[in-house]
Image (tube, helix red, strand yellow):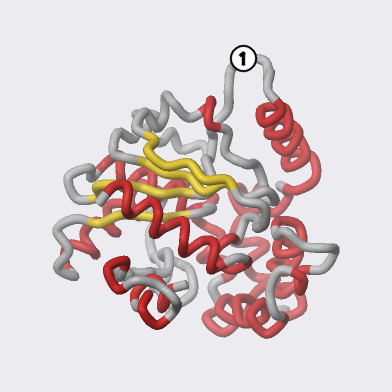
């Protein structure tokens, strides 16, 4: 999706929709360095992203994220509103209603939360409590590293029973190899230990916000649950295909949604 966003005229788009795209790897992931001290949670990463984009010469940015990126994107908009002027996400981490669900969307979200807790969250429990332990095993075994990641591609993509239904096998293996050849199984797991249960800010994100909602997301964002946390939602788009890795699964849909959001806020 990077090239279509940066060079839309080469991908059936309009040159006026072009972005300067900055796509950093999270600290401890892929091509970034591995932190050698504690403290690298969501809020610190958001501060680093602000510094990074400023040093690259951008006075203001629009941030987009899914998974951990959604939490970091929200923190960037919350902590640096003069620099990060709008945020777009596909996941609303921690958003839920205190009242009983009443709408079909709320019932579905509650059911998905329950399923995630009961069947899907074992990896998270391990990584937020003992990330080093599992890291040694994953760094030692290519089959283990592949299984750890590909199971989530199977569980969280919009597929017909195989992860290859959502993305080409070579592309799936490329993703695994980024962890394997850089030996980042342990360092990438530490964000769970650093961030869960550490008392991050609950202040609202007041900059303009947008959400792309995909049917196979772990828990789809529920509009009624987000008003307190995101009081300035200006864009809400729901789609028929795609899941947790929407940028990977349905890149054309994803890119079009980013362009639509940008038109509303820039």
Q: Nearer the viewer, residue 213 or 202?
A: 213
From the viewer's side, name the closer residue of 103 and 129.
103
Q: Look at 79% across and 39% down and name the residue there.
A: 118
Residue 153, image x, y percentages: 71, 64
In the displayed structure, 57 sits above or below 221; it is: below
Secondary structure of residue under mark 1 = loop
Which residue is located at x 42 percent, y 42 percent?
235
Measured as percent of width and height from the top left, residue 102 is found at 68, 18
The front one of 105 and 83 is 105
17 vs 116, nearest the viewer: 17
The residue furthest top is 99
> Where on the picture, by quarter, is residue 14?
bottom left
Locate residue 201 relative to residue 247 in the image: left or right: left
In the depicted structure, whether residue 186 falls above or below residue 216: below
Q: Residue 145: where, in percent of width, then height?
A: 69, 73
Residue 196 as seen in the image, left or right of residue 210: right
Q: Is residue 85 above or below residue 242?
A: above
Q: Which residue is mark 1?
A: 99
Q: Residues within 10 Å of mark 1 (few under 14, many from 20)?
A: few
Lateral position of residue 205 relative to residue 214, left or right: left
Q: Extreme right residue here? A: 161
Please give the name of the residue rendered at 62% of the width and 54% of the height, measured from the top-left corner: 127
- Image coordinates for residue 264, horizontal then vertical, percent: 32, 47
Q: Residue at x 70, y 56 (%)?
A: 156
């Amino acid at each position: 999706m990077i090239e279509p966003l940066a060079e839309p005229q080469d991908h059936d788009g309009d040159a006026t929709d072009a972005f300067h795209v900055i796509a950093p790897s999270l600290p401890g992931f892929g091509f970034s360095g591995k932190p050698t001290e504690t403290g690298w949670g969501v809020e610190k990463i958001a501060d680093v992203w602000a510094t990074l984009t400023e040093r690259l010469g951008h006075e203001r940015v629009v941030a987009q994220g899914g998974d951990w990126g959604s939490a970091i994107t929200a923190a960037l908009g919350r902590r640096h509103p003069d620099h990060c002027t709008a945020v777009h996400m596909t996941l609303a981490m921690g958003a839920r209603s205190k009242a009983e669900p009443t709408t079909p969307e709320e019932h579905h979200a509650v059911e998905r939360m329950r399923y995630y807790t009961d069947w899907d969250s074992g990896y998270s429990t391990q990584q937020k409590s003992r990330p080093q332990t599992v890291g040694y095993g994953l760094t030692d075994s290519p089959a283990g590293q592949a299984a750890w990641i590909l199971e989530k591609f199977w569980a969280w993509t919009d597929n017909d029973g195989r992860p290859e239904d959502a993305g080409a096998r070579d592309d799936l293996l490329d993703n695994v190899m980024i962890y394997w050849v850089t030996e980042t199984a342990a360092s990438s797991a530490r964000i769970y230990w650093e961030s869960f249960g550490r008392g991050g800010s609950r202040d609202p994100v007041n900059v303009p916000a947008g959400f792309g909602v995909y049917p196979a997301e772990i828990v789809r964002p529920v509009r009624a649950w987000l008003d307190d946390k995101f009081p300035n939602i200006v864009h809400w788009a729901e789609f028929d295909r795609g899941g947790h890795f929407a940028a990977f699964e349905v890149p054309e849909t994803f890119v079009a949604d980013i362009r639509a959001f940008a038109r509303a806020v820039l």
